[in-house]
Amino acid sequence: MENGVWVFIENDSRTIADVSFELLWKGRELADHLRVELVCFIIGHQISDAAPELIAHGADKVYVADDSQLACYLTLPYTRIAVDLIKEFRPSILLIGATSIGRDLAPRIASHMRTGLTADCTDLQIGEYKFGKKIWKEILLQIRPAFGGNVIATIVTPDTRPQMATVREGVFKRPSADFSRKGQVVQLNPTLTEQDLILKIVERVKAEKKVNLKSARIIVAGGMGFGSRENFKIIHELARILGGEVGATRAAVDAGFIDREHQIGQTGVTVRPNLYIALGISGAVQHMAGMQESSRIAAINTDPNAPIFSIAHYGIVGDLHETIPRMIKAYKEKD
Amino acid sequence: MPYRMVCLIKQVPDTHNITSDVLREDGTVNRQALPAIVNPDDLFALEIALGIKDKYGGEITVMSMGPPMAIEVLKDALSRGADHAILLTDKKFAGADTLATSSLLEWAIRKYGEFSLIFCGRQAIDGDTAQVGPQVAEKLNIPQVTFAEAIEYLNKDDIVIRRVIDSGYERIRGRLPLLITVTNTAENPRPPSIKRLMFWKKAKTKNSVKSDQEREMLSERGLLIPVWGLDEIGCASDICGFAGSETWIKNVENVKLISRKPKLFDTSDQEIKNLINELVDEHII
Ligand SMILES: Cc1cc2nc3c(=O)[nH]c(=O)nc-3n(C[C@H](O)[C@H](O)[C@H](O)COP(=O)(O)OP(=O)(O)OC[C@H]3O[C@@H](n4cnc5c(N)ncnc54)[C@H](O)[C@@H]3O)c2cc1C
Ligand SMILES: Nc1ncnc2c1ncn2[C@@H]1O[C@H](COP(=O)(O)O)[C@@H](O)[C@H]1O
């Protein structure tokens, strides 16, 4: 029988990251399918309140490493604690959020364990893999868009454990809490060496999050169709009068039209607003992975064959430079 | 104190410039038709290394694992001021995932010898994984600072680095040796110098020269770029390339588009008014 499904729980000053709860939701589903335990581990300081909350959100077992020197994330001690746990309990699957912490930690662990790691999965399932005469049953299918047109790849890690994947915030649901659930809490007593603590955080400056795409009801998103940073500005006006947030494609971000925080998609934010207006966006899979579940999608594009139209509810085949001012005018004059 | 630095750079297809010319009939991208460039973040990493060299002295070796054509990214880096370049190429290196890539890079760096700093880009645009840097650091058993944007202090082996985190930034103090991955919010990369560009233009590897004579001539002028394959590096063939990869592609599927028939409007004032009114009537806006 396979060992458990594990989730790394990220916390920042004792607040658990949303993505960690979302991974518990998916982790629960995978663990039930495999008929194994859902185990998670949390590292930090004064985090004793966390364990009951994690159990309420689906965990069967919680490992807690609590130490004043672990209050802020540091690569080396966090990696060592994780690796020690993995070597002892041999989890079958390990899921980690694709945050700046997760993206620092996950490859370090995978490298140490010499196992595979798939970044930014947009779905995870359990399934079978055949290669030649060999069959692997009930392994993790790590699903993500692949480079090269509108294709989705399924990636597997047949031979090594844990099977590791990172997932962005917003891809999975947040489970509802059930405080009557029972689970086990295990305190760890990590001993930290000088070598573990060789890097020190001198200062940490947290900026207020300026954009909140995840909870926006309306998102007005722009792509390369704008042509320039200058042209892109009008999108802010449209978003403002509609009371929405501004989103963008990776291409628009890379071209410097707007900051990376606004990027929507597989390697950006996943959103599900009431209305998503896609302006000058072609509809690459990596982009659609982050917005296709919007309740209503309106697309404006000069190319009638742009893939974005195939997922849109409303479409305008035309030039956005003409269309946006008319939309602003029409909204101001709406009856 | 002069520093021995290694920059790991990758050649990537220029995914920023996917235009309709490179799309095949079936909607997939013809990778061959995309221009190959230095991974953008890697140039920011090289710039930080060059800045350290300018200020404190030292030497920079750029390494790239890839097909023979990856020599182009090495020449680009040399033209911007790197001192040495090594091309890591071998048929056995093909098909590597990030784990196998990092195993090979570890061996190459160990062969290179003592170092004080290893630089990587934050992530490569062909996969956006950001995995190779930390994987190499773990294998070399040295600390890492990821998503760095500036070196704020450096004195002997004492270093302070500013790095970007999800909601702000951090200053980290550490000791060399260290591996640093660099974001594109760091100082802008300098362009290649024309003089160096002209010089390095003629560089080749021993595998690509046409004659012994040409090889000797290039070697005398310092224009022969070393190539390390499996034999030179001396690692086992089962840790690199496809054999050393633990992630396998099970299958690749075309995306099933939802295929809605959108309600279409034209760009006339009246139609746009109709669209807006419909959205208002349905309480969408
Ligand atoms: C590993 C990886 C991860 C990625 N992650 C993401 C991600 O998270 N998010 C993301 O968005 N992308 C991501 N991408 C990039 C993605 O593949 C596409 O390149 C990108 O989404 C394209 O952006 P775009 O639609 O703005 O540009 P394009 O594809 O260039 O489309 C521009 C569109 O504008 C239209 N247009 C032009 N002029 C006008 C006009 N005047 N009026 C109206 N329409 C006009 C054109 O017809 C075209 O359809 C990723 C790629 C890779 C390889
Ligand atoms: N084949 C390679 N050769 C040299 N460096 C690489 C290679 N692949 C990745 N890197 C380095 O690792 C960084 C992150 O790559 P990735 O994990 O693919 O996103 C890149 O920016 C490079 O600095």
Image: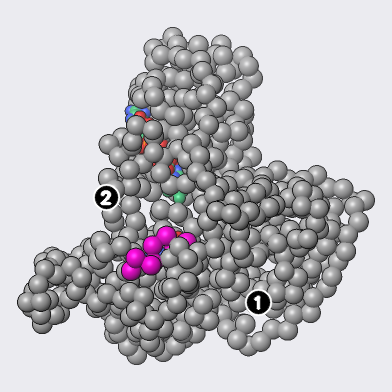
Span colored in magenta: B90-98
**Residue drawn 62% across the image and 45% down it:** A123
Looking at the image, which residue sits at the far front? A133
Q: How is the image coloured?
A: one colour
Residue at horizontal 51 percent and vertical 70 percent from the top: B135
Q: Which labelled disc corresponds to residue B190? A: none
As for residue B193 lying within the magenta part, the answer is: no
Mark 1 is surrounded, within 10 Å at the Cα level, by few (under 14), some (14 to 19) or many (20 or more) other residues, namely: some
From this viewpoint, which residue is outermost toward the top?
Answer: B270
State the residue at coordinates (58%, 25%).
A296
Q: Identify the image quadrant of residue A292.
A: top right
Residue drawn 50% across the image and 32% down it: A220
- Residue at mark 1: A80
In-front residue for pair B207/B108: B207
In the picture, the quarter occupied by the N terminus of chain A is bottom right
Residue B93 belongs to the span the image colors magenta: yes
